Amino acid sequence: MPKPDNIYDELAWRGLIFQESGQDELKKYLSENKVSLYCGFDPTGDSLHIGSLVPLITLRRFQEYGHTALPLAGGATGMIGDPSGKSAERNLLTEEDVRHNVDCIKEQLKHIVDFESGKAELVNNYDWISKINIIEYLRDIGKNFSVNVMMQKDSVKSRLQGTDAGISYTEFSYMILQGYDFLHLNREKNCTLQIGGSDQWGNMTAGMDLIRRCTDSHGYCLTVPLITKSDGSKFGKTASGAIWLDGNKTCPYEFYQYWYSTPDADVIKFLKYFTFLPQEEIEALEEETKQFPNTAQRKLAYEMTKMIHGQKEVDKVLNASQVLFGKGDISAIDAPTFEALKNATEGKEYHSLDDTEGLIALLVDNGLCQSGREARQMIKSSAVALNNNKITEETYKPVASDLLLKHYLLLKKGKKYKVIKFNQA
């Protein structure tokens, strides 16, 4: 099946249109014009997480059709705090904190948005909001907003419900500042479209209305769906926390495994949302997965890890997976991957090699064998391996030279395995 002729039809096929202003008008506008569009993110931390990916990847999709992307760092609004989806006010960040976070996130965006094509520019609303004085803010911007209308927005209304509910004027003004972003970019960059998650609809339409009141131009809004998982669990979260784009917070192996564990009921939807695979390839994967389980999951994990961390890190992840099955190069596994493997296999930590009596004790202590007797039988039958090397000596005790990267052991019994850590080198 050929690629859709315009970005609107591409987004529609992928299920990425949740709300839109103008409806048929927006489709016609995008079909006839090459536009500049923006999507904002608040740098409340030094890394984005995968919950932020869909609108940012959507910016890249627009680029693929010749449009210009303006990812917007909320250097100013990040110091205010967006009330959308929040039950309580955030802790306010310092200017220094926000600047550091923006610098970190810039590097992550380069993996998603194509800045080399000349069809993208990172903008920071601190550059214009910080120059507004209070009189200008009230006279030229605030007068265009009706408090009655603002009170009806979901992001505000939800905070006013309940006995202890409330919202400060600081957060209440967030909508005005985000609206001003759209107006500023419309004037300075001829930006006519804002995209974002569906929880941003109220803030986004406020900016669209501000453009209508203050200029002869026109603005459009389009939201993508917030991602939910069919099993009821929260997308982008694991028992250990959020899945971050920063490899130092979520190592590539953990990142890959998160996508690989996508339920069957979600994997085709996620391939449409997150990857750039064409329709015919996704449909082929859907059919192939019916015969060969996890085929689509494997492709999803590969594509996402390659996008965010690059081919070199994908190759490392695939090698680590091969090592667990007795293949691959165990010496090529790095410390973050070993740490992720230890956590995934629930391997134990020890202070030093002196804390264990030997191989039999490690097998029992780590749940690979139920008893010392079973451990001896497994060793005798050549079913036990240390770092993928068979061990047949019952009394064997690991030594310092066995430790991978001076801290880790890969212990196997049959097809079961544990990565064990010794903290003292």
Image (cartoon, rainbow, N blue to C red):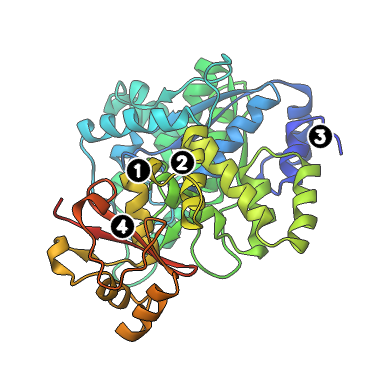
Front one among 171 and 397:
397
Q: CA distance from mark 1 to mark 2?
A: 8 Å
Amino acid, disc 3: Pro
Residue at point 42% right, 55% down? 156
Badge 3 is on which residue?
4
Figure check: 316 above or below 165: above
Q: Secondary structure at mark 1?
A: loop
Q: Is residue 18 visible?
A: no
Quadrant assignment for the N terminus: top right
Badge 4 is on which residue?
409
Q: Mark 3 or mark 1, which has the lower sequence index?
A: 3
Figure check: 17 above or below 415: above
Q: Name the side, left or right, on which 202 lies relative to 351.
A: right
Q: Give the foreground label among 3 and 1.
A: 1
Q: Give the foreground label among 2 and 4.
A: 4
Residue at point 66% right, 48% down? 271
Q: Secondary structure at mark 2?
A: helix
Residue 334 marker: 1
Amino acid, disc 1: Asp
